[in-house]
Image (cartoon, helix red, strand yellow):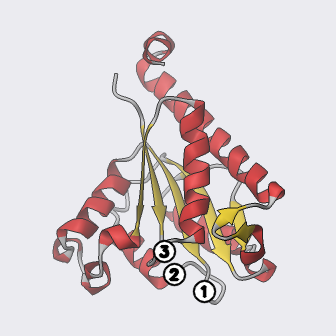
């Protein structure tokens, strides 16, 4: 049995990135719970050609690899910095290129980062409707972190760290449940 593929996507365009740190925290926690094949991508990996592509067939190879990883994953951790109350335009552009059926039934954890607490509801008011359109299975715990929750690029705020751990555990449990339903409990137990 192949291990379930878990892909993290961070909409950062530079490194280091608080958003990537938060996506990685949730991804790491999920992968610590079970044997998943975890990978993380950001828009640095996709390259500058992502924004220039109006259609899927215009995507340069690096951006196409990111899109393929999203569509082929068994579960996702997605995150974006918040600008003016929503995820970035490039984040939305990428998901405009995702096949409308590719995320149906796929477990998704949502994270976001922003300058302050006033953006905290973006996970509920922007991200959830987008992934609802795709029919994705959004885990209950979304995670938002502001600049004050990091120190030198490290997530330090205990409450946010706890939410990230909870989100990772929920995502892992849902992925394991789906894998057991698809393969049977005995095969899953043998693979762990």
Direction from residue 63 to residue 131 in the image, left or right:
right
Q: Is mark 1 on a helix, strand or loop?
A: loop
Where is mark 1, residue-wise?
83
Cβ atoms under marks 2 and 1 closer than 8 Å: yes
Nearer to us in this view, 51 or 184: 51
Q: Residue at x 72, y 45 (%)?
A: 166
Labelled disc at residue 88: 2
Q: Which residue is drawn at 45% across and 11% down?
A: 190
Q: Which residue is drawn at 79% across and 61% down?
A: 157
Q: Earlier in the sequence, mark 3 or mark 2?
A: 3
Nearer to us in this view, 132 or 161: 161
Q: Is disc 3 surrounded by few (<14), some (14 to 19) or many (20+) residues within 10 Å?
A: many
Q: Is disc 1 surrounded by few (<14), some (14 to 19) or many (20+) residues within 10 Å?
A: some
* Residue 1 position (above or below residue 63): above
Cβ atoms under marks 3 and 2 closer than 8 Å: no
Which image quadrant is residue 155 in?
bottom right
Between the C-alphas of marks 3 and 1, the distance is 12 Å
Q: Is disc 2 surrounded by few (<14), some (14 to 19) or many (20+) residues within 10 Å?
A: some
Labelled disc at residue 12: 3
Q: What element carries label 2?
A: loop
Between the C-alphas of marks 3 and 2, the distance is 9 Å
Direction from residue 74 to residue 162 in the image, left or right:
right
Q: Which residue is drawn at 62% across and 74% down?
A: 126
Direction from residue 67 to residue 120 in the image, left or right:
right
Q: What element carries label 3?
A: loop
Q: Earlier in the sequence, mark 2 or mark 1?
A: 1
Residue lying furthest bottom:
84
Between marks 3 and 1 in the image, the one whose residue lies nearer the viewer = 3
């Amino acid at each position: 049995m192949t291990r379930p593929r878990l892909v993290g996507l961070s909409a950062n365009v530079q490194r280091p990135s608080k958003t990537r740190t938060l996506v990685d925290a949730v991804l790491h926690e999920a992968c610590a719970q079970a044997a998943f094949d975890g990978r993380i991508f950001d828009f640095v990996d996709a390259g500058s050609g992502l924004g220039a592509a109006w259609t899927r067939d215009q995507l340069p190879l690096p951006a196409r690899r990111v899109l393929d990883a999203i569509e082929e994953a068994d579960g996702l951790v997605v995150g974006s910095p918040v600008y003016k109350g929503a995820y970035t335009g490039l984040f939305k552009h990428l998901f405009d290129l995702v096949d409308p059926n590719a995320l149906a039934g796929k477990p998704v954890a949502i994270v976001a980062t922003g300058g302050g607490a006033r953006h905290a509801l973006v996970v509920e008011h922007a991200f959830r409707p987008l992934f609802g359109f795709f029919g994705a299975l959004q885990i209950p715990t979304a995670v938002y972190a502001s600049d004050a929750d990091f120190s030198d690029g490290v997530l330090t705020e205990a409450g946010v760290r706890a939410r990230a751990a909870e989100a990772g555990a929920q995502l892992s449990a849902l992925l394991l449940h789906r894998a057991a339903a698809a393969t049977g409990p005995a095969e899953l137990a043998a693979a762990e």
